[in-house]
Image (cartoon, rainbow, N blue to C red):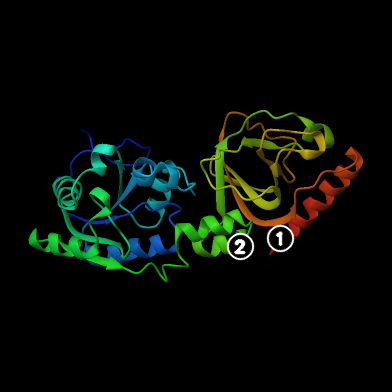
Amino acid sequence: MDTWAEVAGSSTGRRTSPAAVTIGTFDGVHRGHQHLLARTREVADGLPVVAVTFEPHPLAVTRPDRAPVLLTTVERRVELLHEHGADEVRVLGFTAEMAAWSPAEFVDRALVEDLEARHVVVGESFRFGARAAGDTDFLREHCARLGVSAEPLTLLRDGEFSSTQVRRHVAAGDLLAAARVLGRPHEVSGTVTPGDQRGRDLGYPTANVPVDERFAVPPDGVYAGRLVVAGTRYPAAVSIGTNPTFDGTQRRVESYVMDHGHDLDLYGLDARVELVEQVRPMASFDSVDALVVQMRDDVEAVRAVLAR
């Protein structure tokens, strides 16, 4: 079995030289995860830093009923891990077979044999191996027998700086609180697809990204944000919902790119939508004219938020 999944920006195969390794789910690559990466860099003492993550989320394999919605795609996770200090990123293709490995087998195969780990840094709540039987005490003791150092680390007040806390903030629509944990705005991503063209007819053309329910998306409403396409970030008024004024049924993330909305052709392009702050909850309007007046007010409210 090939342990390492092929994901853009990640590496596969066995390493042939020593490395310092940090391992975790790393969903969102929030400030606690960034702390892990920084500490791994400190103990590496010149060795390359390798970040190991999982795809899919282990709970999606072992307890599908408890699998969380995700904060980032695996491709974005790899990108963020590189941005925050990883020299190399590895993606463990998590399977039922891997879930059955003993804790010792997991360390021996994934960390030592494949990665030539000399130092390992994990969050203090990290569990691994069959039935999550391996904890940080076992990791430290087993690694010591192999001549490898292992260090558990508190993720900067773990209860606050956790992926679970980000999901709660996003579900509540509190994007400012989510950003404090992440160290950046929460994002949703996808491919820009044609919509109903109503926005264009109303003078507010939008880039539409269908909502993927596997990922954390805030409640329906209008948000200040930015649309990121091909490395360019555009200020945007973002509507999340089904267009209740027009009895819509498909939930979408619709971004009106301010000052550029009429001259951008984004169909078919991959996009990220950074969500900064909610401007108002979603509402249905009695007339198109009333909706247009509100859209004009929304754009000005978004400008004010982004200007801060």
The image shows residue 96 at horizontal and vertical percentages of: 28, 38
Which of discs 2 and 1 lies nearer the camera? The answer is 2
Q: CA distance from mark 2 to mark 1?
A: 11 Å
Q: Residues within 10 Å of mark 1 (few under 14, many from 20)?
A: some
Question: Image check: 48 left or right of 72?
Answer: left
Say what amino acid the circle numbered 1 marks.
Answer: Val
Count of numbered circles on the image: 2
| Residue receiving disc 1 | 305
Q: Residue at x 20, y 47 (%)?
A: 110
Q: Earlier in the sequence, mark 2 or mark 1?
A: 2
Q: Secondary structure at mark 1?
A: helix
Question: Image check: 126 left or right of 148?
Answer: right
Q: Secondary structure at mark 2?
A: helix
Badges 2 and 1: C-beta atoms under 8 Å apart?
Answer: no
- Image quarter where the C terminus lies is bottom right
The image shows residue 234 at horizontal and vertical percentages of: 64, 47
Question: Image check: 185 left or right of 262?
Answer: left
Q: Residue at x 90, y 41 (%)?
A: 286
Q: Residues within 10 Å of mark 2 (few under 14, many from 20)?
A: some
The image shows residue 169 at horizontal and vertical percentages of: 57, 59
Say what amino acid the circle numbered 2 marks.
Answer: Leu
The front one of 173 and 22 is: 173
Task: Say the numbered circle drawn on residue 176.
Answer: 2
The front one of 280 and 198 is: 280
